[in-house]
Image (cartoon, grey):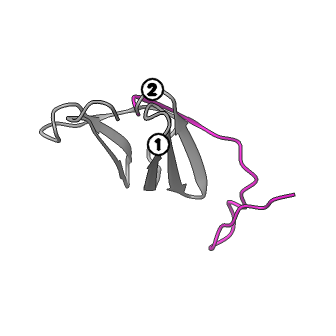
């Protein structure tokens, strides 16, 4: 993110955002509620664009520095214990 005080974290309860270096967090808006988020990635060319990987196997995207998130359609086998993307 372009704001040096902004912190975005993935937790067992979704994605949370702090704009004060982590002193306080608020839940981000979107479809990730009650989802275990294991990973976050920031687009190095446009820091407003972020991806989050979650379990069950899901991918979420943000285009506003992590404030809101939407689930991406992905060819993921959600029933698998070891989910993997399927490329056709």
- Quick one: which residue is furthest to the bottom in this view? 82
Q: Kindly report the secondary structure that dominates the magenta region of the rendered protein.
A: loop
Per the rendering, the mark at residue 78 is none
Residue with the mark numbered 2: 64
Q: Is mark 1 on a helix, strand or loop?
A: loop
The residue drawn where x is 25% and y is 35% is 6
Q: What element carries label 2?
A: loop
Q: State the residue in front, 53 or 63.
A: 63
- Quick one: which residue is furthest to the right in this view? 88
Magenta range is 66-88
Dividing the picture into quadrants, the one containing residue 87 is bottom right
Look at the image and tell me in which quarter the N terminus lies. Answer: top left
Q: Is residue 7 left or right of residue 30?
A: left
Q: Is residue 72 left or right of residue 36?
A: right
Q: Is residue 5 left or right of residue 86?
A: left
Q: How many labels does the image show?
A: 2
Q: State the residue in front, 31 or 53.
A: 53
Lower position in the chain sequence, tag 1 or tag 2: 1
Q: Residue 85: give x, y in percent of width and height.
A: 71, 61
Viewer-nearest of discs 1 and 2: 1
Dividing the picture into quadrants, the one containing residue 56 is bottom right
Q: In this view, does 32 lie above or below 82?
A: above
Per the rendering, the mark at residue 44 is 1
Q: In this view, does 49 lie to the left or right of 7?
A: right
Q: Residue 49: give x, y in percent of width and height.
A: 50, 34
The residue drawn where x is 71% and y is 42% is 73
Residue 68 falls inside the magenta stretch: yes
Q: Residue 36: give x, y in percent of width and height.
A: 44, 55
Task: Compute the Cα span from label 1 to label 2.
Answer: 14 Å
């Amino acid at each position: 993110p372009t704001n040096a005080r902004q912190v975005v974290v993935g937790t067992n309860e979704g994605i949370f955002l702090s704009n004060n270096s982590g002193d306080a967090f608020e839940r981000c808006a979107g479809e990730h509620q009650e989802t275990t988020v294991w990973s976050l990635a920031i687009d190095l060319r446009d820091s407003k664009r972020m991806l989050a990987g979650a379990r069950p196997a899901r991918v979420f995207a943000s285009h506003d520095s992590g404030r809101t998130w939407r689930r991406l359609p992905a060819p993921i086998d959600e029933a698998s214990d070891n989910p993997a993307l399927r490329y056709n």
